[in-house]
Image (cartoon, rainbow, N blue to C red):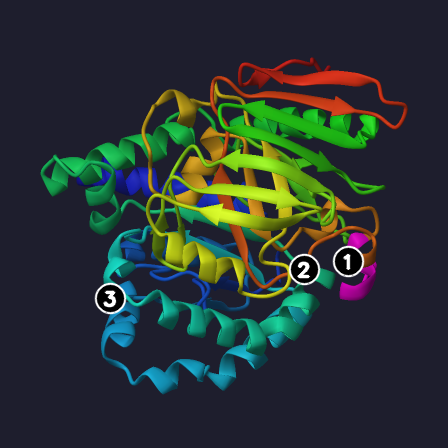
Amino acid sequence: MEMEFDNLLEVYADLTLKVGLNLQEGQRLKIGNFSGTVPGILPFEAAPLVRKITKKAYQMGAPLVEVFWGDEQLNHLRYMHAPRDTFQEFPSWVVGEIESSVKRGDAHLIIIGNNPYLMRDVDPELIAIFQQTRARELAQVFELSDQNPSNWLVIAYATQAWAATVFPTLPISDAVSILWENIVKFCRLDSPDPISFWKAHNRELLSRGRWLTQAKFKLLHLKGPDTDLTVDLPKGHIWQGGSTTLPNGLEYCGNIPTEEVYTLPHRKGVNGNILATKPFTSGGMYIEGMRLEFENGKVVNSSATKGGDVLMKALEMDEGACRLGEIALVPHSSPISQSQIIFNNTLYDENASVHLALGNAYRDCLTNGEKMDKDDFIAAGGNFSVSHRDFMIGSADMDIDGFTQDGSSQPLMRSGEWAFEVE
């Protein structure tokens, strides 16, 4: 069993470097989240995979692999015991490190497996103060990163803390094993050739994205149980999906697994109501049963059955935190959706459902967006924020229509499934 798991990690590491990141000879690699954006990033349990990735990266010509471990328990201890006035402090080295990394074009790998319930006994006000501090300190380097994109990837590792929240009634060893079985299945690590599979899968998503881009829809209408939302799309919007091509021609896949095609809404063109169909986390805090009402792109009313205080603080993070930065289409028949498991993990749950994101929009979803500064991007309809919070609204009852400039409509999804074909 140990040898089988070791071989599995070899395949996972190969897929990570060759398809996800598409690491280039001479390119540095950073593993972990050194900006403090997600609690629990790079858990120590992931060391076996990190070592394999590091070895392979050096064999592929990486001059330096830097690893930034993260212990979410330490984050929790700070929130519980540190003086309140210290949450306006932020490590000065982080800003310079991110800036240097962006300018060099380093590849960046994030491995997640955190406990979504860990921060439930933390004062939401402290989390809000920390996030606002981080927003202030990193605003300039985040804009630099938007204008100088590089290859990045998010993958997951089955930790005990995460597995216990997904399968709480099982012995922990069984919970971890079953979580790994799902990671293997959804990442297709058990297929005869995972790399070939993902290249073909990404081409299919890219084809769907090209079809949607060429349609030049002016407006989308999303209709489902307790959801009735219209979303304006800015002129020159681009639908992305599968792999992404950087301005320098490098192709990478930012999420494994991925089942989505996505673009940016017009920051002032979202109107109506939504109900989140799955729980999600924000700043390490759990939010469930979220309802939002939008007017002219801005959230004007919000509520949640759990985590309402956290939601309010998240919406006040900065000017763009209460506006949408992403709309993503995922068929209800995606493998993750069909498992009928709530993973309490955005990477997996968002690829089971049509979803939206509050906060920052991706510059590559707008023609010449990477060449724009923040003000020009906002003027073109894009949203800027130091936060990006995905939440799921899709279901088997979701219908989506696209409307062109002349008012004609095209069904895009019916009963949660694609309603158009691509070659």
| Foreground residue among 387 and 91 | 387
Q: Is residue 192 above or below residue 370?
A: above
Majority secondary structure in the magenta region: helix
Q: Nearer the viewer, mark 3 or mark 1?
A: 1
Q: Residue furthest left?
A: 171
Q: Nearer the viewer, residue 52 or 46?
A: 46
- Horizontal relation, residue 278 to residue 94: left or right: left
Which numbered marker is on residue 73? 3
| Residue 305 place in picture, x, y as percent | 34, 43
Kindly tell me whether residue 55 is visible in this rendering: no
Q: Give coordinates of residue 126: x percent, y percent.
A: 36, 72
Earlier along the polypeptide chain: callout 1 or callout 2?
Answer: 1
Between the C-alphas of marks 3 and 2, the distance is 31 Å
Quick one: 189 or 82, which is closer to the camera? Answer: 82
As helix, strand or loop, the secondary structure at mark 1 comes to helix
Point out the tag, 3 or 1, that comes first from the N-terminus.
3
Q: Secondary structure at mark 2?
A: loop
Residue drawn where x is 58% and y is 58% of the image: 321
Q: Mark 2 packing: few (<14 Cα in 10 Å), some, or many (20+)?
A: many
> Looking at the image, do the residues carrying marks 1 and 2 touch, with CB atoms under 8 Å apart?
yes
- The reply to whether the magenta stretch includes residue 274 is no
Label for residue 378?
1
Residue extent of the magenta highlight: 369-378
Asked if marks 3 and 2 touch (Cβ < 8 Å), the reply is: no
| Residue placed under numbered mark 2 in the picture | 384
- In the image shown, does 376 or 314 lie closer to the viewer? 314
x and y percent of residue 288 in the render? 36, 42
Pointer 1 local density, CA inside 10 Å: few below 14, some 14–19, many at least 20: some
Question: Which residue is rendered at x = 54% and y = 62% of the image?
Answer: 62
